[in-house]
Amino acid sequence: MTIKQIDVERVSVTSSKSFENVITALDAAVGHPDIEELNRKLMAAGIWSEVEQLVRCAIGESGLMEFTRYDLGGILRKKCGGTSPRTVRLVIGNPLIMVEMLKDVPDAGSYAPVTILIDERSDGVYLSYDRMASLLDSYGNSNALNVARDLDSKVEHLLTEAAK
């Protein structure tokens, strides 16, 4: 067994907008493909250019797509009652970006696609993200790190815009 220590940088943006408006802004910026259908088409693609085209059709204006979403607050409200704050976890990414990191750092597959956490608190709606570059930094691969930094920039821009 090998254990690797990884330091993570968490970015959080606080919005004064309503939870619903933040979610709506995020939804407008990321693609929402039928993931099962997209995966089937990706696996059936014969050449790389077909994969690229399928992904380009699936991503939103942010260059990212939603893979899944978890209504964590909904589950919490089942336990604690209807007054618990809303919390949603979005799993988003871009398979073309993921491939660029994976080819140099296979462990990048543990972190991609990425998670955005949106949660209500007394002082606003928080949008949080763990920087991919911080997750990959200890692997020492400059190519993967450059791709991760570009991904971080896309996600952080998405969070900032959704919070406005």
Image (tube, grey):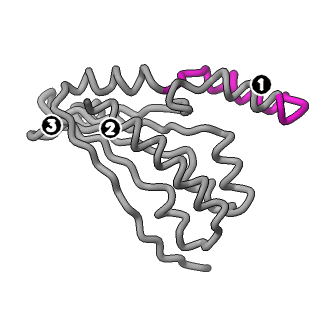
Instruction: Tell me the element at label 2.
Output: helix
Residue mark closest to the camera, 1 vs 2: 2
Q: Is residue 54 left or right of residue 142?
A: right
Return the disc, 2 or 3, that comes first in the chain's sequence: 3
Q: Which class describes the residues within 10 Å of circle 1: few (<14), some (14-19), or many (20+)?
A: some
Q: Is residue 140 above or below residue 72?
A: below
Q: Which residues are magenta?
A: 30-49
Question: Which disc is residue 86 wearing?
Answer: none
* Amino acid on which the number 2 mark rests in the picture: Thr
Question: Residue at position x 32%, y 37% from top?
Answer: 160
Instruction: Tell me the element at label 1.
Output: helix
Question: Residue at position x 56%, y 54% from top?
Answer: 148
The residue tagged 1 is 41
Who is closer to the viewer here, 3 or 80? 3
Q: Is residue 75 left or right of residue 3?
A: left
The residue tagged 2 is 160
The secondary structure that most of the magenta stretch takes on is helix
Q: Is residue 43 magenta?
A: yes
Residue mark closest to the camera, 3 vs 1: 3
The residue tagged 3 is 124
Question: Residue at position x 48%, y 38% from top?
Answer: 91
Which x, y percent locates residue 161? 34, 32
